[in-house]
Image (cartoon, helix red, strand yellow):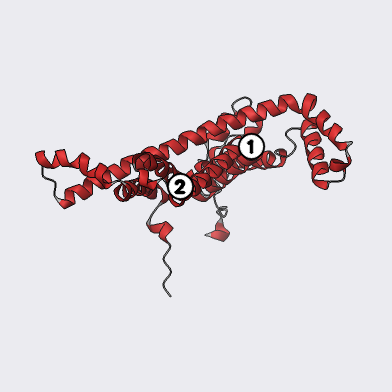
Amino acid sequence: MLNVDLSNIVRRSSLAPLSAFIPGLFFEISILLGNPQLITSRTAPTEKLVPLSPYLQLAIALFLAFIIGRASMLLVHFIQHALTYVHLARLALSAKLRTPVLIPMLNQLANMRLFASRPTFQNLRARVSQHAADAQKEARPASTALHKLASKLFLERYGVNLGTAGEEWEPLLWAVGTLTELEWRGPLLIIASEATGWCGLVATTLAPTLRNSYYIALSLIFLLTGLHNDYRVAGRRTDPEATAAWKTRAILREYEKGGRTTPHSQEKTEPPQEPEGPDHA
């Protein structure tokens, strides 16, 4: 049986531009089915000046589909960055209000029988208290593993001892190992599906026929699935534990690229020479 690994034939970097056709073609097909008069009214003046062959019309349609799809996917990237700042603001606000507001409120609720008898509430109260006492407790194991692995990589490959590094430790760490698009932005098809949802909602403004429950529900499913991914991506970008785990995987990939040892970590040794003498003549 022949097994073909498409990941070795078609790389993710080459699929990224092609994914823009998904929302773009969805938008164009929706307009074509929902309001064909809009398309004919726009192409009729051009047909009078320059006759368009079917192949040229197809090429123009594909070009416009790529432009529309790419613009909608850029909108998704902008939403991910915006949600990242929202998460940072939420973390800062939570840190400010946790001790003076949240913990006293949970303590008051613990006196009520409705909440005191629920294990979920008690677990939440314990986590909030532990996080207030030591905010870095959950992220410390992942950060420690990252520091050990990075120190070993720098010493073996570059001859740099990060144990003696000072303020330059963090810039050196983030200069090695690149996060993949999947780790940084999420699955490509999920991003394309969210862009498809946005294109579907815009299409309803240009084609009133599309304003029915089935089409809007389909567009909302695509949109909400993508927004859920955006929320999780923004959360991972701001979570110290997740960030350390991502960077650890990136450094492990560096080991796979160039090997584990270099001349910095291994001294060249010459084989011992036998002494010359009459017995060895």
Instruction: Please tell me how crowded label 2 is: few (under 14), some (14-19), or many (20+) other residues with Cα within 10 Å.
Output: some
Looking at the image, which residue is at 49% across and 35% down? 79
- Name the kind of residue labelled 1 in the image: Asp
Q: Does 33 appear above or below 231?
A: below
From what the image shows, is residue 54 above or below residue 64? Answer: below
Residue visible at 78% across and 39% down in the picture: 127
Q: Position of residue 250 (x, y in %)?
A: 55, 44
Q: Residue 186: give x, y in percent of width and height.
A: 51, 45
Answer left or right for 74 relative to 160: left
Q: In this view of the protein, can residue 267 be seen by the observer? A: no
Instruction: Tell whether 248 sits left or right of 141.
Output: left
**Which dot marks residue 216?**
2
Corner quadrant of residue 122: top right
The kind of residue tagged 2 is Ile
Q: Is residue 107 left or right of residue 140?
A: right
Residues packed near mark 1 inside 10 Å, few (<14), some (14 to 19) or many (20 plus): some
- Kindly state the secondary structure of the residue where label 2 is placed: helix
Secondary structure of the residue carrying numbered label 1 = loop
Q: Label 1 belongs to which residue?
A: 239
Residue 168: where, in percent of width, then height?
Answer: 59, 26
Residue shown at the point (13%, 50%) measured from the top left: 53
Q: Calculate the distance from the C-alpha at mark 2 to the C-alpha at mark 1.
A: 34 Å
Foreground of the two, 235 or 146: 235
Does label 2 or label 1 sit earlier along the sequence?
2
Residue 71: tell me if it is visible: yes
Where is residue 180 shown, x and y percent of the image?
A: 49, 44
